[in-house]
Image: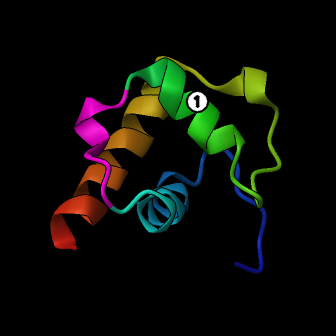
Amino acid sequence: MAFDLTWDRAEDIAIELAEKYPELDPLTVRFTDLHQYVTGLPNFKDDPMKSNEAKLEAIQMAWHEEYQER
């Protein structure tokens, strides 16, 4: 990707997570683990402390959509 990932880019983060963890069902991932997965992405450049439950849930649901399409 040519741009930085931030907490507000749920769909882009979901694509990256689906590519990195293709066998992982997103609905089985705890938010604490999801936070680590997101902040561990190479293009993630946001403040890790700016996450919240709503942002993590949006990422998880977008990732689930990607998971179902694969």
Horizontal side of 30 relative to 4 (left or right) equals: left
Query: Where residue 36 sits: x, y (%)?
Result: 62, 32
Residue at x-position 77% and y-position 58%: 42
Reply above or below: 53 against 17.
above
Query: Where residue 39 sits: x, y (%)?
Result: 70, 39
Residue at x-position 44% and y-position 25%: 54
Residue matched to label 1: 35
Residue at x-position 70% and y-position 57%: 5
The residue sitting at the left extreme is 68
Reply above or below: 21 against 53.
below
Q: Quadrant of residue 1?
A: bottom right
Please check the rendered image and state whether residue 25 is part of the magenta-colored stretch, yes or no.
yes
Question: Which segment did they paint magenta?
Answer: 23-29
The residue sitting at the bottom extreme is 2
Reply above or below: 38 against 10.
above
Between 66 and 58, the one nearer to me in the picture? 66
Between 26 and 11, the one nearer to me in the picture? 26
Q: Helix, strand or loop at disc 1?
A: helix
Query: Where residue 50 sits: x, y (%)?
Result: 72, 25
- The quadrant of the picture occupied by the C terminus is bottom left
Please check the rendered image and state whether residue 56 is part of the magenta-colored stretch, yes or no.
no
What is the crowding at mark 1: few (fewer than 14 residues within 10 Å), some, or many (at least 20)? some
Between 24 and 27, the one nearer to me in the picture? 24
Query: Where residue 18 sits: x, y (%)?
Result: 41, 62
Label 1 amino acid?
His
Reply above or below: 50 against 8.
above
The residue sitting at the front extreme is 23
Q: Quadrant of residue 13?
A: bottom right
Residue at x-position 54% and y-position 64%: 16
